[in-house]
Image (tube, grey):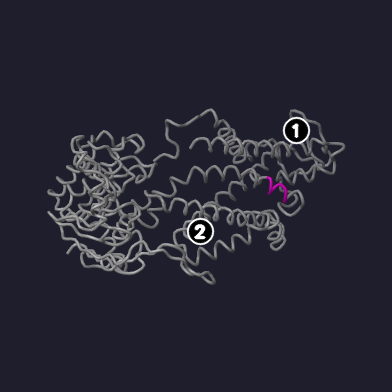
Amino acid sequence: MLLEVKNIEKHYGQRPFLFKRGQEAPVLQKVTFSLQEGECLGIVGQSGSGKSTLGRIILGIERPTNGEVLFQGINLYTATSKHKKMMRRDLQAVFQNSYHSFNPKQTIFEILEEPFLNFEHFNKSERQQKVRELLDCVELESALTQNYPSQLSGGQQQRVNIARALALHPKLIVLDEAISSLDMILQKHIIQLLQTLQKEMKLAYIFISHDLQATRFMSDRILVMQHGQLVEEIGEDGAYQHPASQELYNAILPSHPRERANNRFE
Amino acid sequence: MNLVRKDRVHSKGLFSLPLLLIIGLLGLFAPIVMPHDPLAVDIAKKFLAPSWDYPLGTDHLGRCVLSRLLLGIRYSFGSALVIQLVAIVLALLLGAFVALKRGIIDFLFIRICDILLAFPTLVLAFGLLGLLGPSLKNVLLALIFTQLIYYSRMIRSLFIGINKKEFIQAARITGTSGIKLVIRHYIPNLLPPIVTIVALDVGKVILEIAGFSFIGLGVQAPIPEWGMMVNEGKQYIRQHPELMLYPGLAIVLVVLLFNHLANNLKKLD
């Protein structure tokens, strides 16, 4: 088992401090699921359903209030720093806002060499070679290395993000709305890219999105979230039974005018 | 990674930088450049008018005013730079530490800072100087301390401001942590505002050093600090106002140049 999420709960708000009474609002309630190696798991839900918070907890950026996350059998939050460092190698992420994921003062080369500086002992020319390979992998020209992120288009930026996530050959990538801000053609292109890379590198993905269509295309299984809870798991050919899943399904816009009549919002 | 991207430099706003460099070099090489010994007393030559031998004349003890001004660069301008550099480096260490640790340390730090910042910096420095006794070293210590409180509080806020930025989280996920995170991601993004405020405050610190010397709490008698020179000149303000005017103008010039530099550094980013 690559990843096990057990009974995760998260509350936001003020903790009690000295004389102040705490005020807490639950964001995640009793979330439990697991993920196999090489699998792609979709997580869908409306805005505010807690899916991004879940993603951040899996990544170890945020601590859950209760519950535990086991990555390759090791608890993310109680691991020793050596284990944590190993986990950082195997657990990567791509966020929605591609530009904000870059330090604006770094060039593309500096962004992409950072994982190697942290984990490998490559010299400069080896790093340059690696960065070129990475750019090649996401179909970008290696001439871009001296540019700043602000000089790239949104699609190029997102591909650099993916390249950075791939750098250390991770086992799991959390894609948090990673393609939602791109145009349809680019979305399709990047989905294809992700699928090819998945086959080549035996990657597992957690694909977090509000776009059921793209998620369905990408994922082996889909978890539907509502108000911080997992309400349904949809398998390969599963039906949408829970009202929240049906609502998401009905919200898919028809791709052709003729289909409009038989697929209306209810 | 450049502090200033090449395509963004407006070089015309930076003319104060070479001027300040020249002043700094004059102070550094003062012993070579000075026409006379600035400390040599010769009562027979007191209050001389400007001449080729004494370009700015002599003071009430017959000492060369130009030589004293040149050596004074070290005490006014030089010590202000030292104060700012030491204060900002210490503040970076302290502010970064507190901002990354948070928790109870951060809470205590903020409360203590707020209490100390409730006093105007000058009053705080006054108190410290009264405690330590007047001397150049103690002026440096007192001003470093007051600047340190102010800067570490500011740097803490700047750090916390970008703590939540996505690129910091992305860097953490990439495996960057601790001091590497600070050097690669925090500092380059915070340097422009920090450089600006440090440059702006050099002028303020020069004025404070001069102020302390003027009221006799700072640099002591024979040392030609500019505030000290203004103080010595004030007894002869009716007969020889130029004795106050020269060091006064020197202070104004350097402070203005620093403010101009800071203003243009601000526009760079």
- Chain hosting mark 1: B
Q: Are marks 2 and 1 on the same chain?
A: yes
| A5 in relation to B240, above or below | below
For residue B216, say whether it is visible.
Answer: yes
Q: Residues within 10 Å of mark 1 (few under 14, many from 20)?
A: some
Residue A158, labelled with which disc? none
Rendered image: mark on residue B94: 2
Q: Please give the residue where the numbered disc 1 appears in the rendered image.
A: B56
Q: In front: B162, or B267?
A: B162
Three-letter code for the amino acid on which mark 1 is drawn: Leu
Q: Nearer the viewer, residue A178 or A172?
A: A178
Residue A161 location (% of width, % of height): 28, 45
Q: Is residue A106 above or below residue A175?
A: above
User: Of the residues under marks 2 and 1, which one precedes in the sequence?
Assistant: 1
Label total for image: 2
Residue A100 position, x and y percent, is: 37, 44
Q: Amino acid at mark 2?
A: Leu
Q: State the separation of the CA atoms marked 2 and 1.
A: 46 Å
User: Residue drawn at (30%, 69%), measured in percent from left and top?
Assistant: A67
- Identify the secondary structure beneath mark 2: helix
Q: Is residue A132 visible?
A: no
Q: Please state the chain letter of the residue tagged with numbered disc 2 in the rendered image.
A: B
Taking the image as shown, residue B233 lies to the left or right of residue A64, namely: right
Specify the segment rendered in magenta: B207-212
Q: Residue at x 72, y 42 (%)?
A: B38
Measured as percent of width and height from the top left, residue B59 is found at 79, 39
At which x and y percent is residue A74? 24, 67
Which sits in the foreground, A73 or B54? A73
